[in-house]
Amino acid sequence: MTLTVDAAVTIQSRIQREPAFALALLDEAIAVFLNGEPDVARLVLRDLVNATIGFEGLAVATGRPSKSLHRMLSAKGNPTMDNLTLIFGVLRRELGVEIRVKTVACA
């Protein structure tokens, strides 16, 4: 019998074990969001929140109810730009990074 591990558990474990992986996921969430894939960005942000600050901690940091944050970062969530800005800001502080965006010309 093959043993399997839930992908979310594997991702959370790796985020907690490897800070560089957490930073790569934050970078990916920003990139996919800015490139028109908000549904993917929300799910990546959800994994980051679960593995770092947690939804209760995010609720305290943003002043938003944790249930609302769960819905915002679900597959069918629809957070406002203000809420996304808050979430990105909290994760940025939690991971101790500065976010810079660079545009490049398409080939």
Image (tube, rainbow, N blue to C red):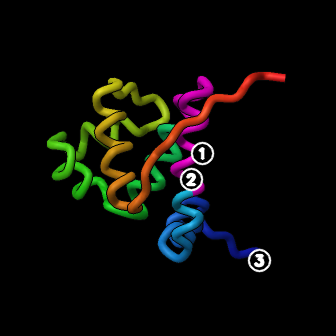
Pair 3/1: label in front: 1
Circle on res. 69: none
Q: Distance between the residues labelled 2 and 3?
A: 32 Å
Locate residue 83 relative to residue 52 in the image: left or right: left
Viewer-side residue, 96 vs 6:
96
Q: Mark 3 points at which residue?
A: 1
Q: Identify which amino acid the numbered label 3 is placed on.
A: Met
Could you tell which of marks 3 and 1 lies nearer the N-terminus?
3
Residue of label 2 = 25
Which residue is painted at 26% across and 52% down in the image? 58
Span shown in magenta: 24-40
* Callout 1 secondary element: helix
Between 82 and 72, the one lying in front of the other is: 82
Expressed as whole percent of the image width and height from the top left, the position of residue 24 reads 59, 56
Indicate whether residue 70 is drawn in magenta. no
Residue highlighted by disc 1: 28
Dot 1 alpha-carbon crowd within 10 angstroms: few under 14, some 14 to 19, many 20 or more: some
Q: Is residue 27 above or below residue 38?
A: below
User: Given the image, on which type of amino acid does mark 1 rest?
Assistant: Glu
Residue 6, given in percent of the width and then of the height, sits at 59, 63
Relative to 25, 83 lies left or right? left
- Quarter holding the C terminus is top right
